[in-house]
Amino acid sequence: MDRTQLLLGLAFALFSLGFVGVMVRRNALVMLMCMELMLNGVILSLVTFAERSATFSGAVLVFLVFVVAAAEIAIAIPIVLLLGRQKRTLDVGAYSELKG
Amino acid sequence: MSSLLLWFFCAAALAGGVLMLLARHPMRVALALIGCMISLAGIYALLGVHVIAVFQVLIYVGAVMVFMVYVIMLLDLRDASFLERYGPNIVPAVVLAALLAAALGAAAGNGRIVTAADLALYHGGRDGAAFEVAPFSREFLERYWLHFELTSVLLLAAVVAAIAVIRTGRRRDG
């Protein structure tokens, strides 16, 4: 099996696992971590392609994605913290007034 | 040896992903995710993309996941989501994800994402040496310095937004 195909398969598997986690799990923090898993799968495919084409721009893009992920977590965690404090639970079923 | 290590890290990353779905307590989920991320860093290092492997460990494991673990310890709520792991829509979610994985896998297997010609072309390219720390850093700070500086603006905006979120929540509380 070719290395690129192996890594792409792993990236797809991680993305799908994260997708299942976001849809299935009930804890808001766990859902957030599953989103990180999806992002990691996508970054793995990006790194694979960047390494294959041997260009710097792909690696620079990965760096920018890392920074965006850090910023995303820095905003998402306070929101989850506030929800947890207000509702005294992290169960997403309790946040029913959030629906549109 | 290197290919054996690659298989090992792939298996470890996959196992971490599966454990994340099975573990009950958020702390165990976080530890599984950390294991998965460290395995991914190992894969990046094996690919020769050392800079990204270091970023992965420093930014993801060192910053994001430590933050996450800290929040889990800080909240320490005992609620229903600890006892019952899965919500009501588990069957459609698993079916949908299986379809997604099958579609992605089929597209990759058919060569719609990476064709054999692409692979042959890529194999002719430079073999990872471009990503060693010195050439990468030179290129990064010569050609992409503006992007690098702009990320600091993004981080500043994120910090201000986080403070604003906490402030509004506190005002509503009391």
Image (tube, coloured by chain):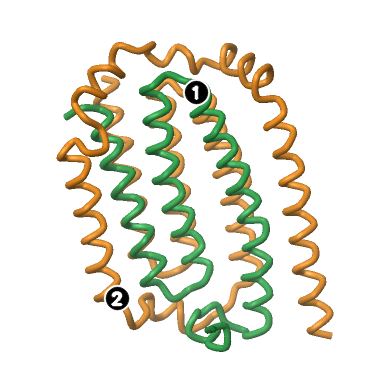
Chain colours: A green, B orange
- For badge 1, the amino acid type reads His
Classed neighbour count for the residue bearing mark 2: other residues with Cα under 10 Å, few (<14), some (14–19), many (≥20): some
Looking at the rendered image, the quarter that the N terminus of chain B falls into is top left
Closest to the observer, B108 or B60: B108
Q: Quadrant of residue B145?
A: top right
CA gap, disc 1 to disc 2?
39 Å
- The secondary element bearing badge 2 is classed as helix
For this view, does B173 lie left or right of residue B85? right
Where residue B80 sits: x, y (%)?
46, 84
Give me the disc on residue A98. Answer: none
Q: Are marks 1 and 2 on the same chain?
A: yes
Q: Residue B105 appears at what percent x and percent y? A: 21, 47
From the image, which quarter does the C terminus of chain B lie in?
Answer: bottom right
Q: Are marks 1 and 2 in contact (CB under 8 Å)?
A: no
Residue under numbered circle 2: B90
Above or below, comparing residue B66 to residue A2 in the picture: below
Q: What chain letter is assigned to the residue under label 2?
A: B
Q: Is residue B157 above or below residue B29?
A: above
- N-terminal of the pair, mark 1 or mark 2, is 1
How far across and down, in percent of the image, does residue B170 sit?
81, 77
- Tell me the number on the disc at residue B50: 1
Residue A11 in percent (x, y) is at 33, 43
